Image (tube, rainbow, N blue to C red):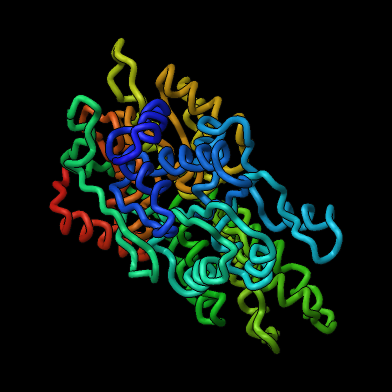
């Protein structure tokens, strides 16, 4: 660190020694315009980048900033930037917001305001038309979160922006070393480097243990889930799009019967107009194909783009009618289910928790918006209050609810996508109402709580159906336990 003035500036903004060192070297190294910071999850990478953005806006030449991140992390970026750089409200740009910006300027001119901080999903930005729009102006600084995901079209986007010269500086952030990128200088931060200004170690690692809330589904529930799995297997065999729909339906069913019904009703609503046209021997148009292919975006908060149908795609009428009748039969079977044993197990567990005068923090994670609202109503029915945050809650209100939970304690219900990146190091217990479906999602759930300032062990709890009769869920559970064993995590009942 050669520039004491810069060091003092960043230190006064509340950065830690390793952050001050990196930030100072970043602003003092014009010969290395593209740099990547590799540091463990929960060690303040977003705060560091937000501080560098504020520094650029205050001391730079123009102040046009571009931030790319996975869609679920945009909320955290909005929150962090609003606190670090309150003078410049970040602008979250999705497809609709971009079209509105474009309509405000003459054709051919750059629609991007200046000065501004533009927040955008990298999967939206990688589309050819959006990449072209981004290349129509110059950017003083581009920040790419989760840079280890820079592969395929994402990598092409990065190389086009940096190679064409429209991006002057770029900061890449990740907890996982990415593949080598040309002209990118990488700085890896070890846990031992994360200390305060007195040299005290700040980032502690805790033993990971898995606890279970065991329950057993009724015969009616098992019969429904097995029939649903048969339907999903037929759906997955249709074409390339069927596997995604089938996965979403089975995941929703594993979450809750209510979630399964919501997803199936959504699919029925999408398919009914096609079914009616086929029954009346009417021709099917392009809009019918798009409806047939539509993913269940109302359930998946991370879904931003609609799948495009391949040229010449058609619907096999006889096969479709058979599938539609199967869907109706599965929906009729839901009426035979009189109880939700998984929810009952959670409610019983929450009731049995020992009441103490000590403030406690419990976080319940689920994968779907419909399940989150269902959880809140069930929790409140037993006299317990719950804070809940989902993609349906406006940004300002989410921040208020999270602050209310942090201040008062209690139960926080949230979806993976909305709570991703939020600092929850003070939480005592995480109840995984839905199983994580990938190793990455499992790791994200752990690291959501293993962040700066954690001083105690975390109780991590999973709900498990002891019957083992729902094949899709049982295979997922086995994969989860294999991952746990690989990490030498002890399992406790």
Residue 51 rendering spot, x and y as whole percentages? 46, 37
Q: Residue 283, percent across and down? A: 83, 84
Considering depth in this image, is 268 or 297 the residue closer to the camera? 297
Tag count in the figure?
0
Apparent side of residue 126 relative to residue 252 in the rendered image (left or right): right
Q: Residue furthest bottom?
A: 312
Residue at the farthest top position: 357
User: Of 298 and 51, which appears nearest the observer?
Assistant: 51
Question: Quick check: 399 above or below 229?
Answer: above
| Residue 355 visible in image | yes
Above or below for 351 versus 52: above
Give whichever of 251, 127 is nearer the camera: 127
Which quadrant of the figure has residue 308? Answer: bottom right
Q: Residue 184: horizontal and vertical position, in percent?
A: 38, 64
Q: Is residue 430 left or right of residue 126?
A: left
Q: Quadrant of the N terminus?
A: top left
**Residue 377 visible in the displayed image:** no
Residue sitting at x 27%, y 51%: 466
Q: From the image, which quarter does the C terminus lie in? A: top left
In which image quadrant can residue 323 be found? bottom right
The residue positioned 59% from the left and 57% from the top of the image is: 263
Instruction: Identify the residue at image location x=69%, y=65%.
Output: 136
């Amino acid at each position: 660190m050669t520039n004491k003035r810069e060091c003092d500036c960043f230190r006064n903004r509340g950065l830690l020694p390793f952050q001050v060192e990196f930030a100072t070297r970043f602003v003092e190294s014009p010969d290395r315009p593209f740099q990547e910071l590799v540091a463990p999850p929960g060690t303040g990478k977003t705060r560091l980048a937000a501080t560098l953005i504020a520094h650029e806006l205050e001391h730079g030449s123009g102040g046009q900033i571009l931030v790319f991140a996975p869609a679920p992390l945009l909320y955290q970026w909005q929150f962090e930037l609003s606190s670090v750089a309150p003078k410049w409200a970040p602008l979250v740009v999705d497809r609709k917001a971009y079209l509105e910006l474009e309509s405000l300027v003459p054709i051919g001119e750059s629609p991007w305001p200046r000065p501004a901080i533009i927040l955008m999903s990298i999967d939206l930005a990688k589309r050819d038309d959006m990449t072209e729009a981004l290349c129509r102006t110059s950017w003083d600084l581009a920040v790419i979160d989760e840079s280890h995901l820079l592969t395929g079209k994402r990598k092409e986007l990065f190389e086009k922006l940096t190679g064409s010269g429209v991006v002057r500086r770029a900061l890449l952030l990740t907890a996982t070393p990415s593949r080598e990128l040309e002209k990118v200088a990488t700085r890896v931060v070890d846990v031992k480097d994360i200390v305060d200004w007195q040299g005290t170690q700040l980032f502690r690692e805790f033993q990971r243990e898995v606890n279970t809330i065991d329950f057993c589904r009724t015969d009616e529930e098992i019969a429904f889930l097995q029939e649903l799995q048969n339907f999903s297997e037929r759906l997955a065999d249709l074409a390339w799009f069927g596997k995604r729909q089938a996965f979403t339906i089975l995941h929703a069913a594993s979450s809750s019967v209510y979630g399964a019904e919501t997803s199936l009703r959504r699919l029925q609503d999408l398919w009914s107009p096609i079914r009616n046209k086929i029954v009346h021997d009417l021709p099917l148009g392009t809009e019918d194909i798009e409806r047939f292919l539509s993913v269940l975006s109302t359930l998946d908060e991370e879904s931003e783009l609609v799948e495009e149908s391949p040229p010449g795609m058609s619907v096999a009428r006889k096969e479709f009618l058979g599938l539609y009748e199967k869907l109706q039969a599965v929906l009729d079977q839901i009426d035979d289910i009189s109880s939700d044993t998984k929810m009952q197990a959670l409610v019983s567990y929450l009731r049995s928790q020992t009441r103490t005068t000590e403030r406690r923090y419990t976080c319940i994670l689920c994968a779907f918006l419909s399940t989150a609202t269902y959880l809140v109503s069930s929790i409140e029915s037993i006299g317990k209050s719950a804070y809940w945050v989902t993609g349906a809650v406006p940004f300002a209100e989410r921040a208020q609810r999270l602050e209310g939970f942090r201040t008062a304690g209690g139960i926080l219900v949230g979806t993976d996508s909305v709570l991703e990146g939020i600092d929850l190091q003070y939480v005592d217990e995480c109840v995984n109402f839905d199983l994580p479906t990938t190793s990455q999602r499992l790791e994200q759930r752990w690291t959501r709580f293993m962040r700066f300032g954690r001083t105690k062990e975390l109780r991590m709890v999973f709900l498990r159906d002891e019957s083992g009769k729902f094949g899709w869920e049982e295979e997922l559970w086995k994969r989860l336990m294999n991952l746990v064993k690989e990490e030498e995590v002890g399992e406790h009942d």
